[in-house]
Image (cartoon, rainbow, N blue to C red):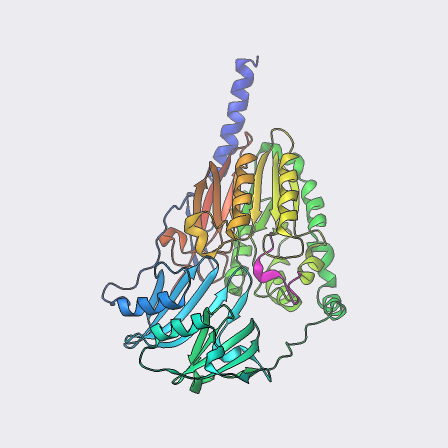
Amino acid sequence: MMSKQKHFVIFIILYVVAASFSQTDIPRRIGKWRVGVGPPGNEFYEIPKPPAQTKPPSPEILSVIKSLAPDYTEVKRWRRMNEKIFWIRAEAGPEEYDFNISTEARIITMDYENDSTNVEEAAHRLVLKGTKREIPLSEVPRKSMEILARVVQDTVPSKAWIASTIAGQRYIIQIGGLAFYARPDGQIQAAGLIDRGALNEIDPSPPKQKTYQEILAELEELLVSYRERFNFENQLTKLGKRASMSDDGYRFIIMGDSRSNPDLWASIVKHIDMIDPSPEFVINTGDIVLRGYAKELLEYYLPPLMETDMPYFVAIGNHDDGDNAMAIEYRYLFGDNALNYYFDFGHVRFILLDNVTRVRPYEETLEWLDKTLADTPQGFRKIVVVHKPPGNIKKWAYHAWDINNSEIFTKLMTRHHVDHVFFGHIHAYSTATFDGIHYTISGGGGAGLHNRFGPMGNVHHYVICDVMPDGTIKQQVVRFYEEPKK
């Protein structure tokens, strides 16, 4: 049994450490940014609604949308482009159909995108040059003709073609001044005005991708002098030298989606360096640059970090995968094994996971995650950081990981009693509890903000996490507000 005196000593230590963190010195201004600090938590969620004075799409318009978009149930996003035209999005899982449609329910354009396969179809950039062949209307799939008869009731089809496209074989049906594109199973995928290029043909030769040797030569020229410093294993070695101090409590930072705003990115790095007590390290939830190119890393991500010696770790984002979507540039700078790795610090296991690239199959990644969580030392807390949030948390499903992998992932989090999971991808601050596990999105590091999470969420920010000697983690949200020019 522990003596009362020892209990008292431990209580005093905990009190002193907690008090020191609660008296954090956080500058309230940096550059053109006013800084606010608040407690964690933001359960607010609301799908944006158009202004009350704007009339919603009519039943006739919705009927046309329903005929063209499979599995459509309701319009979740729309806006009035002008007095005569609506923009409407119909969603079905990862599939999105975007329409421009007149107030008289006449289609102007229809584009398709699949977020899980990255397939995009738009009439003016679809047909591969030299592959279009005119066919009789009788060869068009019956389903397509039936759909178009409902959608365009006052004009009949006049011509048809079959063509190879960037998305596969498509039937093209001309009705008046419109061209509709249909899959072999009859589903309409795209449409556009012929006088605005809806029958355009594009070069069948895709832009020449750089070879691995060409990419490597560019990397050797631009990033070779940064590799040693930013390789994650070298940063972990540096961090490990400070691990003995972590028993008294320590601090780390979570932030994400820091691309596309150089002034804010530089200001956040500088601001983190100014807070007291200082963090031991920073974890970025991904999307550190726009496309993952070497030049972007050199000119955008690295310059502010050259002014600090604080370790920075990254969970790769979908914008970071580089020239051939295999994250060659990312791995060159951060290390060959920098997509899925973990480190133990201060009785916490931190796991950084890739759920955006195809360098390793997701199944393999999730198996590795399961094993890494299972092997966590007894008594250690567990924190997982990954870019895309799970699609089975409903308020995040509009911009999330696919549902099958999401369900496997969240079950692992619950089974292994993970203490906290952090994401990016959604450009906001948002929190949720799902099956007993705490989840936080921190994607406010610079990219354009989403608008579903209220004034406490639709804001640029980073999160301070203070680990107490007893292992509990206290959070503060540091928000940045751009001051208007005088």
Residue 278 visible in rendering: no
Q: Could you tell whether 344 is left or right of 200 in the image?
A: right
Q: Magenta includes 432?
A: no
Depth check: 133 or 84 in front?
133
Q: Nearer the viewer, residue 475 or 320?
A: 320
Which residue is nearer to you in this view: 331 or 279?
A: 331
Residue 436 can be seen, yes or no? yes
Quarter-wise, where is residue 86 in the image? bottom left
Residue 367, x across and y down, in percent = 64, 43
Q: Residue at x 34, y 62 (%)?
A: 75
Q: In the rendered image, which quarter contains the N terminus?
A: top right
- Vertical comparison of 40 with 69: above or below: above
- Please state if 45 lies on the left or on the right of 369 as rendered: left
Q: State the predominant SS element of the stretch in magenta.
A: loop
Residue drawn at x 69%, y 45% as measured from the top left:
236
Percent position of residue 105, x then y: 30, 74
Q: Is residue 325 left or right of residue 460?
A: right
288 up-or-down from 193: above or below? above
The residue sitting at the bottom extreme is 195
Q: Nearer the viewer, residue 193 or 63?
A: 63
In x, y percent, where is residue 147? 39, 71
Total marks in image = 0
Q: Which residues are magenta?
A: 315-326
Q: Is residue 56 left or right of residue 137?
A: left
